[in-house]
Amino acid sequence: MDLNRQMHAKPPHLYRGFTLIEMIVVIVLTSIIASAVAVFIKLPVQSYVDTARRAEMTDIADTALRRMGRDLRLALPNSVRLTDGDATIEILLTKTGGRYRAADDGAGAGDLLDLTINDASFDQLGPFATGTGQAIAAGDRLVVYNLNIPGADAYAGDNTAVISGTAAGALANENKINFAAKKFPFESPGNRFQVTEGPVSYVCANGQLIRYWGYPIQAAQPTAATLPTLGGLSALLANNVGAGGCVFNYDPGVTARSGLVALTLIITEAGESVRLYHEVHVTNVP
């Protein structure tokens, strides 16, 4: 048995395997090759990472500025105001508007807005708007001829009244708006009115751009420090806003009918910054 086993045993030099020295040599060669490959792919990979980061920063800034622009285009005429070193901007957001009846139809019919008394209703010329978010609701605020001056300042409530509801008008294709009795100080030359759903603020502070809404209207503009205490809602629009990365400018007299809001937003990350500039025309025809 032992003799048979010895006859079939392989000589030691025929066994397959590798020595420790061979393994070390392979490891060293593999490391050299990996290092050489890393040198060639490092720059393309880093370039891809940098490009992706810049694209993300640009997208964040662009989305935030477009959101601000959409609100600004719906701002109540002459309601844009700035504070906190031009890092906080506030508007009154309109949801709809129209023309009020200023005279009867010649036969004594129609509910006109009487600016000589505390009136509480009027007929809108034409039907109500039916678009998304445009339906007039109780609690909305009616505004007539906002000029942002003492006596005609919507923030101070000079020319506003709280809407209590709507009803069918006395004439075809007209609807009635009911509101808390109010004597409006000035007549709109175009018999226009607006309906606002409340104030909206954009605040740049502590490296963030935040939108605030749903808080009560304040005669004096709230600041970044006071807005969180007013009981409204907020949403984060952008992080990594660099120092001095938000600058809002407002020129109310670009034309006789519109103002210009200039928005600058800088996003900083990993030692790089993306700066976007956006201009929005706002109507100032009350």
Image (tube, helix red, strand yellow):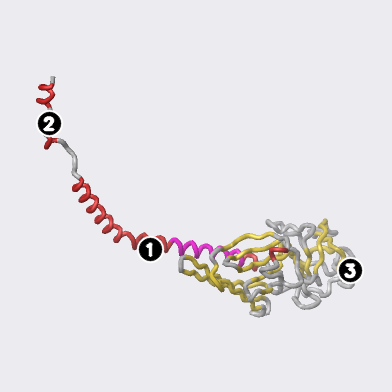
User: How would you rate the neighbour count of disc 1 (Cα within 10 Å): few for under 14, some for 14-19, many for 20 or more?
Assistant: few
For marks 3 and 2, the one nearer the N-term is 2
| Nearer to us in this view, 274 or 37 | 37
Question: Which residue: 68% across, 79% down?
Answer: 256
User: How would you rate the neighbour count of disc 2 (Cα within 10 Å): few for under 14, some for 14-19, many for 20 or more?
Assistant: few
Residue type, label 3: Asn
Read off the residue under disc 3: 118
Query: In the shown orientation, is residue 28 left or right of residue 258?
Result: left
Q: Which residue sits furthest front?
A: 2
Query: In the shown orientation, is residue 192 left or right of residue 114?
Result: left
Q: Secondary structure at mark 2?
A: loop
Residue type, label 2: Lys
Read off the residue under disc 1: 47
For marks 3 and 1, the one nearer the N-term is 1
Q: Secondary structure at mark 3?
A: loop
Q: Give the label, 3 or 2, closer to the camera.
A: 2
Q: Tell whether label 2 touches label 3 (CB within 8 Å).
A: no
Kindly report the distance in space between the C-alpha atoms of the residues bearing marks 3 and 1: 68 Å
Residue type, label 1: Ser
Q: Give the label, 3 or 1, closer to the camera.
A: 1
Write down the region rendered in magenta. 52-68
Q: How far across and down, in percent of the image, does residue 280 sit?
A: 61, 71
Residue 10 numbered mark, or none = 2
Answer yes or no: is residue 188 visible.
yes
Q: Which image quadrant: the C terminus?
A: bottom right
For marks 1 and 2, the one nearer the N-term is 2
Q: Give the label, 1 or 2, closer to the camera.
A: 2
Residue 161 found in image quarter: bottom right
